[in-house]
Image (spheres, helix red, strand yellow):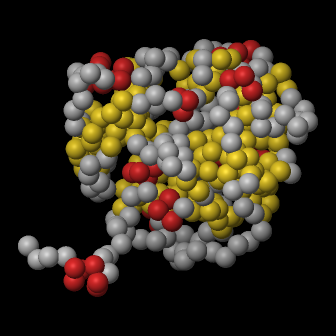
Amino acid sequence: MPCPCASFGAPATIKNNDGWGRGMIQSKYPALWFTAATLCLGLAASAEADDPQLPTASKSCPRKTLATIEVRGNQSGQLLVPVRVAGHDVWMALGLKGGILALYGAAIADWHLQTIQMENGARYITVNGQKVHEMVRVDFMLGSHGFRQWPMIVVPASDFSGLYTYEGKPVVGQLSSIFLMAVDAELNLVQNKITLFEQVKCGSDAVYWGGSITGIHFDVDPTGLLHFPMLLDDQEIQTSLDTSAQSSHISSEVTKKFFGFDEQSHRAMALTARGLEIKNADVELWPMQECHPDRSLSRLNGIGCEDVFGMTPFTIGTDLLKRLRIYIASKEHMIYFTRVDPPAPTAGAAAATPSQ
């Protein structure tokens, strides 16, 4: 499917970056499908919820609000979500650039959860290059909405030592994009809010707050990763939302093969998608040795990682996401963006500004 195009932003500064956020990957082997099916079974187990106050709604698209969640951000731009997991009030890092839900073994060691040994395709799930062998099924709550017996992999304690607490509660894992396929969701990160809705099929009328709307079809890979095409310097590239870091990232393997530069030769790039007009987005160059980029042969075209699932060669970071308001319509596989305008200057500030 062709990508809608026009200016999403230009120029973009390219920087180096490295970090744990490269996260969970799976090789594209036949055995993967068994694992992927197991990890996705939780989609049918979205539980009943209370009926919170409905946001201002379009009469053409009645909807039911399931939960409104206040998220927090740390200095690196990572977003944390308050979650009740297996009866424990904790935080999970919001990791929308990945599709597999994960718990840190060291953080849940005293929870005494019943683990399940993963076989067949599971041996291809890796974190930091280390294979993952165990998973659990747990209930979790986001605000007032429950998800029953969802599968989560358990990251071995030896593979992740960066455990920490925030506001007195531990950060115990990563909440990936797969949960968004059980609900509709609004990401309003400029106000640090995520709102969950019952799924609807209303087209762009689901964007109840109005404004100029950009709609892009998305797909979901076998790990649950939500991805969609964008244009980067007029080349279509598979993209995901990165809520783990401030800056957007692009694979250095992609820039070498398709854009003609690498970590040693930075240059500005233009990000494009109809109607958003966001300029000066910071993009960091990101080594992704697991990604062997090529043109996609799937329903969604563009440059993608041909040998692995669970990652895209380009990600949009929280600095840029906070300049957008997003509605994810999961039944329609559509993601709708609107521009978030900066607040108007106060009268005092305007008076203090010298005339040109």
Residue for point 43% across, 38% down: 315
- In this picture, residue 293 sits left or right of residue 162: left
Please, is residue 352 above or below residue 4 in the view?
below
* In-front residue for pair 288/325: 288
Which quadrant of the view contains residue 110? top right
* Residue 18 in picture, x, y percent from top left: 46, 28
The quadrant the N terminus occupies is top left
Can I make out residue 220 in this image?
no
* Residue 109 in picture, x, y percent from top left: 84, 34
Residue for point 90% across, 32% down: 114
* In-front residue for pair 197/322: 322
- In this picture, residue 187 sits left or right of residue 287: right
Q: How many marks?
A: 0
* In-front residue for pair 47/87: 87
Residue for point 54% across, 61% down: 192
Residue for point 41% across, 71% down: 210
- In this picture, residue 238 sits left or right of residue 220: left
* Residue 174 in picture, x, y percent from top left: 66, 40
Please, is residue 88 above or below residue 23 in the view?
below
- In this picture, residue 142 sits left or right of residue 4: right
* Residue 72 in picture, x, y percent from top left: 59, 56
Can I make out residue 282 in this image?
yes
The quadrant the C terminus occupies is bottom left
Which quadrant of the view contains residue 353? bottom left
Residue lying farthest to the left in this orientation:
356
